[in-house]
Amino acid sequence: MEISALFTSLIWSLGLCELNLAFAINGSGNDLKQRTGFTGYRTVAGVSTEASSVKCKLRGAVRLPAFSMDGDYVIGGVFSIHNYKHTAEHNYTIMPEPLKCTGSIDYRKLRFSRAMIFAIEEINNSTKLLPGIKLGYRIHDSCASIPVAVHVAFQLSNGLDPVFYTGANCSQSGVVMAIVGESGSTLSISMSRIMGPFNIPLVSHFSTCACLSDKQQFPSFFRTIPSDHFQADALAKLVKHFGWTWIGAIHSDSDYGNNGMASFLNAAEKEGICVEYIESFYRTHPRSKIQRVADVVRRSTAMVIVTFAAAAEIGLLLEELSSEPSPPRQWLGSEAWATNPDMLRFSFCAGTIGVGIQKSVIPGLREFLLDLSPSEVAASPLLTGFWEDVFNCRLGKSAATDETVCDGTEDIQTVKSPYTDTSQLRITNMVYKAVYAIAHAIHNAVCQDTNSTTQCDKITRIESKEVLTHLKKVNFSQNGYDVSFDANGDPVATYELVNWQKSESGSIELVTVGFYDASLPVGQEFRINKNITWVEGRTQVPVSVCSDSCHPGTRKVLQKGKPICCYDCIPCPEGEISNVTDSPDCFPCPKEFWPNSQRDTCFPKPVEFLSFDEVLGIILAAFSLGGACLAIITAAVFFHHRTSPIVRANNSELSFLLLFSLTLCFLCSLTFIGAPSDWSCMLRHTAFGITFVLCISCVLGKTIVVLMAFKATLPGSNVMKWFGPPQQRLTVVSFTFIQVLICTIWLVVSPPFPKKNLTIYKERIILECALGSAIGFWAVLGYIGLLAVFCLVLAVLARKLPDNFNEAKLITFSMLIFCAVWITFIPAYVSSPGKFTVAVEIFAILASSFGLIVCIFAPKCFIILFKPDKNTKKHLMNKN
């Protein structure tokens, strides 16, 4: 089919006029002349045509306005006063029937249309806005139907009149400057695509789809209600604010619901909110579809349901849910239904929270709505139907014999309905502001404001394009409410947070509990200033989560195949903490810190070292001091009996030097107890190494003396002259000096230093002395071991000497103990953890020192003190 024929079919199907109206496109006019008998053309939407005579026979298919009034400039209005249209079949063989609305009247939408009339009459009576100019209106009922809305859009843009002119000049009468409407986003989208090419502004009071902010597609669309982009963001932040992470989502299967829910889901994803289910339906869907959605709600585990739906759809769903008992659910509603008074009849939804347009006050509106005269009602089919529905009677001759006749005594003042309810003027104020915005745009186009007066020229005709230009710039305040549009034709987004609360009488009331202002900084948009009543009258915020929050000390692990809000809580591993709720990860404590038992805080690790305050330190210190005292007492005994044979026979000089070195050996173990420091670390190892070499040197000297003394008794031996007291002193000094030299080199090259050992125990710090140079440490021990082995070998060689009191035997036992202790010490030292390493080293020092003093000096002291009869030269010289 050719394009021209398509246009012809479109015009016919829309019922605008009979088929003898056609458009000439791209030079196809002659063909149309032959087939339609059309003889004249005019310019339509930028298409060049001839202009001779235009004939368009009006048929019944042309929709008459629900309300109309002539004026110098006409404003159109489109409202969904009915929710359904009569379905008619189109067979393209006969003229289609007129499009008719069916169903009951939506009293709220009727109030919107009457509010538009009120605003226009208020402007016509104003001396400041458009003085001397009368605004007219053409208000149509779209039946909430796309075909009807498109039909009305064509009718308003074409400016069809009951009177037709055949001359070259087409009538401007009836051409609208702008249109207020529509209530639904889908209808506004359809109308905007028609209005846009003609530059006719469409100012909506209730179409919130964010898609309408696209100026490429909808260049002439404006609205006084905020975009769903802001509403979706507000709902997502509201869900996050109350800690809900597991929700259900229901939306209308329409442009409003689909786009609004898409925006909400994007915002919810950013806030970390998970959706258990997403269901959509439309009011024209079969009941089975609505039942399925209701069943999903009943079976769901999500406590909270977020809805982006029109009141008509939600009403059907709530009706279905009320038919069978349903688990309590916390409803969150969009402005399309949350503030609709008709919805308050569903008492089981008490506690619902919704985003709503701010309440407002329009002085004089209630009086205007109630000022309906019988003649005015009878003149309008819409008001007639409204009157008959409200009072359940019939006007005039339309009444049947069994029906009540309206006698004119009915008092609308006593009626309680959404039409008469002006306590919650929200969307009504959006209609009111839309009319005033258009009026201000016309005013700026035709009026000149001076300092004291305003002059308006109603003779000069203006095009809708001029109104569109001025509408983008309007910025005024009406009744305290600011009106302006941004580059996308949107107003500043402000909302009320409303709560469905039960009154004392048991009825549901809308209570404003807070506000949302998108223009405020992030995090400050919400302001909740009243207590909220929750589902089933609860005072505590209901919980709606897939998994309970993970407490600090645990982390979230997602459950396989489920959304991110469904997870298990796993305790943090050893050495790691989480200090926030629902932490996705645990993080390790710093090196010197360790978690508490709850694993939610890092505490400094306890520092551990062998101290004088603990039992082990006290015991070792006591033995150290006890050993030193024992050595001093022994020295005192020896000094007191220094002239006795047994003391003199055992080389008293080396004995006193040995006792002195043993005293130092006992005392040097004290340096290993207490907190390590630079000085104590250097002192403990060097003092230990030097004193023990001094001790072993003395023992070695005594062993050599014993051997030399035995050799001296042999005939012709004069060996003692080579190992007299000077040589003994030189031997001790020489051996000791070598150890001093080793220790000095160790301290200069890489001395021991205090160190925090973090590796042995994870939960505590071992404060110890690092060796600095391991070679230096083992050189010191090796040298001591070398002297001890040498001394042991010599002592073994002299152990069977025939003297009654054999010093070599005692030295042999002492060196065996010494070597056994230090051979055992090496693996114990390497394997002992923490402070026990120090304890093992102290034990080795004390054990070897006690072994020396007991084996070498105990027998002598026993004889001196308890067996004086054996302390004689004769007894010592006897052979075994």
Image (spheres, rainbow, N blue to C red):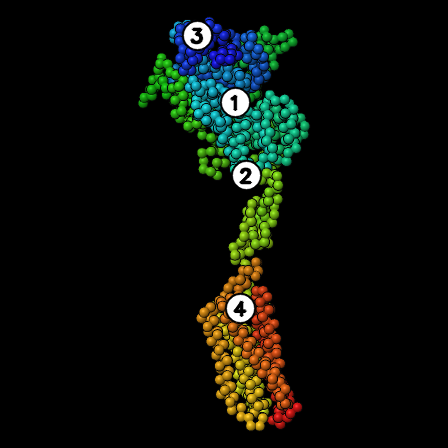
Give the CA separation, mark 2 to mark 1.
30 Å
Q: CA distance from mark 4 to mark 2?
A: 54 Å
| Disc sitting over residue 272 in the figure | 2
- Seen as rendered, the residue at the extreme left is 451
Residue placed most toward the observer, 407 or 691:
691
Rendered residue at 60%/73% (across/down): 823
Q: Residue furthest right?
A: 324
Which residue does the numbered mark 4 point to in the structure image?
Answer: 674
**Which residue is identified by label 1?**
186
Q: CA distance from mark 1 to mark 3?
A: 38 Å
> What is the three-letter code of the residue carrying label 3?
Asn
Q: Quadrant of the C terminus?
A: bottom right
Q: How many marks?
A: 4
Residue 39 visible in rendering: yes
Q: What amino acid is labelled 4 in the image?
A: Gly
Residue 290, percent from left and from top:
63, 25
